[in-house]
Each structure stands twice: as C-alpha cells, then as structure tokens.
Image: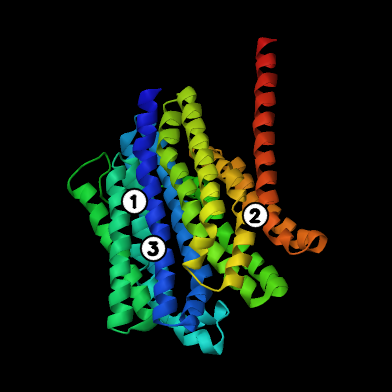
C-alpha cells in the first residue's frame, strides 16, 4: 500500500503543480491585459473565450481519449499498439490545429462577428483571435504532449514544461504590453510563444529516449481513431461545460445584480479557475494508474487508486474552503479595493466555493469511468453535472429564494450529480449480484 501511495504521489503532485501554474498564469494574463491595455481589451478577450475554450476542449478530448487507451495497451504489454494510439492522437490534434490556424489567420473578423463582438470590440477580438490561433499548434501541442509524456513515466518533465511556459508567457506579457505596446495582439503572441517553449521542452523526452514512446509516422486506423474520440468525449464535456455554465450565470447575474454583480462573479471565476485546477490535477494524475492497472486486469489496484484520488481531493476541498472562509476578503481585494464589491463577492463566494467539496469527488468519478473506458457513464455524469442540474437550479432558484439562489444552484447541481454517481454504482452492484446468481444457478 505504501508503494502505491508513492506511485500515486509521483503522478498526482506534478500534475497538480502543472495545472495550478497554468491556471495562475491565466489569471496573471488577465491582469496584464486589463491594466496594460484597458477594460475594452479585457472584454475583447472574453468575447474570444468560447472559441479558445472549444479548441482546448477538442484537444483534451483527443488527448485524454488517446492517453487512456495508450495506458490500457501498456498494461496489456502491447507497447507498439499503445505507441500508435499516441501517434494517431497527435496526428488528429495537428490536423485540427492547422485548420483552425488557417481559418483564424484568414477570417478573424468573421469569427469575431460570429462570437458576438460589437463594433467597438471587433478589431480587438479579431486581432486576439488572429494571433492566438496562429499559435494553435503551440497551445494544443503543449496540452497533449504534457499528458502523454506524463503517462510515459516522466511526470516531472511534464510539470517543468508547464512552469516554463507559464513563466515565459508572463515575462513576454510584460515586455510586449508595457514595453513594446503591442496591445492585445502582444498578449496573444506572448501566450503562443509561452506554449511553444513548453512544446520544445517536452520534445526532449523523445530526443533523449527517456520512455517507451517514439515519434514516427502513425498507421491510421479508422476504428482506433473513433475509439480515441469516443473515450475522450467525457473530457470534451468537462472542458466545455464551464463555458456553458459561465454563459448562463452571466445572463442571470447581469439581469439581477447588474455590473457590480458581474464584477464579483468575474473575480469568483478567476479564483475558481485556480482552485478547480487542483482537483483536475489530482484526477489527471490518477488517470495513468487507473488505465494501466485496468489494462493489467488488476481491478483491486484500480479501486485503491480511485479511492486515493477521492480522499485526496476531498481533503484538499475542506482545506480550501477553510482558507476561503478566513482569507477570502483579502484574496478578493487583490483584484479590486471597492468595499461594496469585496463584501458582495465574499458573501457569494463562501456559498459558491462550498460546492467544491462535492465537485472534488465528482471530478475523480468522471476520470475513473473515462480511464476504464466506460464512456457512456462518464458522458452522462459530465453532461448532467455541467449542463443540466446546475442550469436548471440557476433558472428556478432565484425566483423562489431570491439572489442567493444564484450561488446555491451550483451546490445543488453538484449534490444531484453525486446522487447520480451513487445510483450508477448501486445499479452496477445489483447487476453484478444478479449475474452471479444466474451463473450459480
């Protein structure tokens, strides 16, 4: 058991650090744009978020689908097949990134209009999209290669690459925005070059032949490409659902609480990005162990790793909630010193962040079902959590209990998701007992 914990920590700790650093630099990126270019530039970046989120969601769908199948193949001692799964995943990502880059460079204004950019924000949004998508292979490559390199037994390099990318991005943000005055285009270029630096570092894993994976032209197999996409669909939903939830919250918050409410929700969003990265980091850290042992048919170890992930996330969520209760107002004041805004945001956040105690468990469950190729269950849980329960409560509760219902909705959404997970586990147990009785008879 002690060696399993050591193995768990080997993957989970670098994954958490990498995810936290990536989330932190998103926050810092927003601060640079807001202070160095202006509020309209920050709004222009926000208009582009649905498209950039979609690109990340597609990349992570292919990455997590391919990584899960690859680890299962390794567990079955089918290393050549596992390597080809990795190569096919990279091929898909490169093709999609290239297509998006071409569209972004040639038609940035049309994309900005499709995303709802006003006349005032059109140029800023178009400039951001053009340069962001120009470096699409950097963003997608960094996300994908860090996951595959981690699963190939080199989690520390994956973590280091993300840290270097984040530091490079922040340094270039300062240079391009405050020294060169390149504005919003500078922010996009800084982000792109930061991610490309991560890719270069990750490629050393293959140059130095540190693991099992090798780079060469893949043998494309239609059924395996479909399997990669099918296995990764839950991750696509996990990545995309926050954008849907944020859009829904934006509509309700602006109509009921006005601009100060939107400012408060934006601050909660930035803080949540960092906190959720911890839970996602743990769940992505356990994925290689879950898939590998599932491939070996060591189901006892699969269950132990799953429980470790749940316990770690749950304990972290309690610590985080305590920190928010005690230091929440000071954290909020970093973003803005307005006392009315700090109070409104803190009152909302202590309710909103309570949902993370349940979410920490739900996130690991999605990864568990995805890693063991039970995509249908993972899809149901992901969709219900991100796009059904919370939004239903968000629409209904404010009419019943007032504005507090906005923030309570996400708690009830996570509770309903946990109940669904427990029902699925119970149904599975009953089904196994029934089948065993039939075999006995």
What residue does disc 3 label?
Answer: 25
What residue does disc 1 label?
Answer: 146
User: In the current view of this chain or complex, which residue is farthest to the bottom?
Assistant: 119
Few, some or many residues within 10 Å of mark 3 (<14, 14–19, 20+): many
Q: Residue at x 38, y 60 (%)?
A: 140
Q: Residue at x 33, y 79 (%)?
A: 177
Q: Residue at x 33, y 49 (%)?
A: 87
The residue lying toward the viewer, choosing from 390 and 381, is 390
**Quick one: SS at disc 3?**
helix
Q: Which badge, 1 or 3, is on the more N-terminal residue?
A: 3
Q: Which badge, 2 or 3, is on the more N-terminal residue?
A: 3
Q: Looking at the image, is mark 2 or mark 3 nearer the viewer? A: 2
The residue lying toward the viewer, choosing from 81 and 192, is 192
**Quick one: SS at disc 1?**
helix
Residue 31, quarter of picture: bottom left
- The image shows residue 193, relative to residue 235, as above or below, that is below
Q: Which badge, 2 or 1, is on the more N-terminal residue?
A: 1
Q: Residue at x 48, y 77 (%)?
A: 42
What residue does disc 2 label?
Answer: 351
- The image shows residue 75, relative to residue 86, as above or below, that is above
Q: Position of residue 368 (x, y in %)?
A: 52, 38
How far apart, in angstroms, are the residues tagged by discs 2 and 3? 26 Å
Q: Position of residue 441 (x, y in %)?
A: 70, 10
**Quick one: SS at disc 2?**
helix
């Amino acid at each position: 058991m002690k060696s399993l914990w050591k193995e768990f920590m080997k993957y989970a700790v670098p994954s958490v650090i990498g995810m936290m650093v990536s989330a932190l630099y998103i926050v810092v990126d927003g601060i640079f744009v807001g202070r160095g270019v202006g509020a309209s530039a920050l709004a222009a970046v926000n208009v582009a978020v649905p498209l950039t989120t979609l690109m990340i969601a597609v990349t992570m769908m292919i990455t997590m689908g391919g990584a899960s199948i690859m680890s299962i193949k390794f567990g079955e001692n089918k290393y050549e097949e596992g390597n080809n799964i990795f190569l096919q995943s990279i091929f898909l990502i490169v093709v999609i990134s290239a297509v998006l880059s071409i569209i972004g460079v040639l038609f940035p204004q049309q994309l900005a209009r499709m995303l709802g950019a006003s006349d005032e924000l059109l140029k800023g949004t178009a400039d951001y999209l053009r340069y962001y998508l120009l470096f699409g292979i950097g963003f997608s490559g960094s996300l994908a290669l860090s996951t595959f390199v981690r699963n190939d037994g080199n989690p520390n390099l994956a973590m280091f690459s993300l840290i270097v990318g984040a530091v490079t991005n922040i340094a270039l943000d300062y240079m391009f925005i405050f020294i060169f005055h390149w504005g919003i285009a500078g922010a996009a270029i800084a982000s792109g070059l930061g991610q490309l630096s991560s890719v270069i570092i990750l490629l050393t894993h293959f140059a130095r032949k540190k693991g099992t994976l090798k780079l060469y032209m893949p043998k494309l197999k239609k059924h395996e490409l479909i399997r990669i996409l099918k296995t990764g669909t839950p991750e696509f939903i996990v990545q995309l659902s926050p954008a849907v939830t944020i859009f829904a919250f934006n509509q309700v918050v602006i109509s009921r609480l006005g601009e100060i409410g939107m400012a408060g929700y934006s601050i909660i969003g930035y803080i949540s990005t960092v906190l959720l990265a911890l839970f996602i980091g743990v769940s992505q850290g356990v994925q290689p162990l879950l898939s590998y042992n599932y491939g070996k048919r060591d189901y006892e170890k699969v269950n132990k790793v799953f429980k470790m992930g749940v316990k770690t996330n749950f304990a972290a969520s309690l610590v985080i909630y305590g920190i928010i209760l005690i230091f929440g107002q000071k954290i909020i004041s970093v973003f803005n010193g307005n006392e009315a805004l700090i109070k409104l945001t803190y009152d909302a956040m202590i309710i909103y962040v309570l949902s993370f105690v349940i979410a920490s468990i739900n996130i690991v469950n999605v990864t568990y079902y995805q890693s063991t190729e039970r995509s249908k269950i993972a899809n149901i849980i992901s969709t219900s959590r991100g796009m059904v329960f919370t939004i239903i409560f968000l629409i209904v509760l404010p009419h019943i209990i007032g504005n507090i219902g906005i923030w309570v909705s996400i708690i009830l959404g996570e509770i309903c998701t946990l109940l669904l997970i427990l029902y699925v586990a119970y149904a599975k147990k009953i089904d196994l007992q029934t089948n065993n009785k039939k075999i006995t008879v």
